[in-house]
Image (cartoon, rainbow, N blue to C red):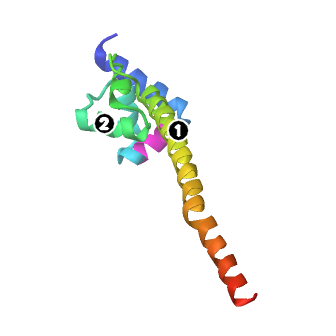
């Protein structure tokens, strides 16, 4: 099986996984159903821009559509790691916020309440 046939087969597989019909894909690409069918059967050579459009419609990276192996992290793994990093950062920031709230209350809140109480006593309330 040549590269064009493998790409056509991958497009078909991803389309089916997304639950899309050939008619759906043809409409989204502005093609006739016959032209899209020819594309999936490998009878039509794909341009890079058409491949990019198909990858976007199928919501997958172009490298995945093309079946290219990558030494870098997959997009999903990168998102997992970024999510973990952001959750840890959020926890640290929440802790800092809680500490500052306590300090503010200690420095200003309790002192102001104490001053108001003293002033009320002074004027006879």
Callout 2: SS: helix
In what quadrant of the picture does the C terminus appear? bottom right
Q: Main secondary structure of the magenta part?
A: helix
Callout 2 environment at 10 Å: few (<14), some (14 to 19), or many (20+)? some
Q: How many marks?
A: 2
Name the residue nearer the viewer: 2 or 97.
Answer: 97
From the image, tell me which residue sits under label 1: 87
Mark 1 vs mark 2: give the one in front.
1
Residue 21 appears in the picture as rendered: no
Does 92 sit left or right of 70 as displayed?
right
Callout 1: SS: helix
Say whether disc 1 or disc 2 marks the residue closer to the N-terminus. Answer: 2
Q: Residue at x 51, y 41 (%)?
A: 92
Q: Residue at x 60, y 67 (%)?
A: 111
Residue 104: give x, y in percent of width and height.
55, 60
State the image quarter where residue 36 is shown: top left
């Amino acid at each position: 099986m040549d590269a064009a046939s493998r790409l056509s087969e991958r497009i078909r597989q991803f389309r089916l996984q997304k639950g899309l019909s050939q008619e759906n894909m043809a409409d989204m690409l502005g093609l006739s159903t016959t032209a899209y069918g020819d594309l999936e059967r490998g009878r039509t050579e794909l341009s890079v821009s058409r491949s990019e459009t198909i990858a976007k419609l199928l919501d997958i990276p172009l490298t995945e559509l093309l079946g290219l192996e990558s030494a870098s992290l997959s997009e999903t793994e990168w998102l997992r790691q970024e999510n973990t990093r952001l959750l840890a950062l959020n926890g640290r920031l929440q802790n800092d916020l809680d500490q500052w709230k306590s300090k503010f209350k200690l420095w200003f809140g309790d002192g102001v309440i104490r001053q108001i109480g003293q002033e009320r006593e002074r004027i006879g309330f």
